Image: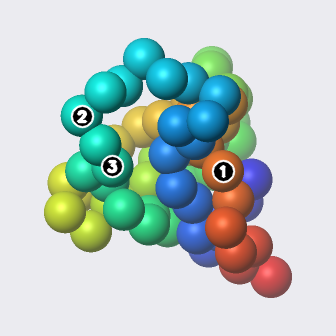
Amino acid sequence: MKIGDLVKMDFEENDSWKFGDVWGVGIIINDGSGLANADDVEVLWPGVGLSWEMKTMLDIINDGA
């Protein structure tokens, strides 16, 4: 995953969240490189704002290439 990728939460692999998709489509603004935990990326969500997410919780829907 890299900066500019459009992502959605992956509800198929993680069914622990039962409240629907409140995030929508987000864009990665920080790929986590250089951080102690490189498994996280910072995502800008339209209705939620900024948050750090584990890469395993996300699906890329359109890469930023």
Residue 35 visible in this rendered orientation of the protein:
no
Q: Secondary structure at mark 1?
A: strand
**Residue linked to disc 1:** 59
- Please name the residue shown 70% across and 42% down the image: 33
Of the residues shown, which amino acid type is indicated by label 2? Phe
Q: Quick check: 16 above or below 8?
A: above
Residue that extends furthest to the bottom in the rendered view of this protein = 65
Of the residues shown, which amino acid type is indicated by label 3? Asp
Q: Nearer the viewer, residue 28 or 61?
A: 61
Instruction: From the top left corner, tell me how far across and down residue 4 is, in percent.
Output: 62, 73
Q: Nearer the viewer, residue 59 or 53?
A: 59
N-terminal-most mark, 1 or 3: 3
Q: Quick check: 1 above or below 38?
A: below
Q: Do tag 3 and tag 2 residues touch (Cβ < 8 Å)?
A: no
Q: CA distance from mark 1 to mark 3?
A: 13 Å
Q: Do tag 1 and tag 3 residues touch (Cβ < 8 Å)?
A: no
Q: Point out which mark residue 21 bears.
A: 3
**Residue linked to disc 2:** 19
**Dot 1: within a 10 Å radius of its alpha carbon, few (fewer than 14), some, or many (20 or more) residues?**
some
Residue 44 visible in this rendered orientation of the protein:
yes
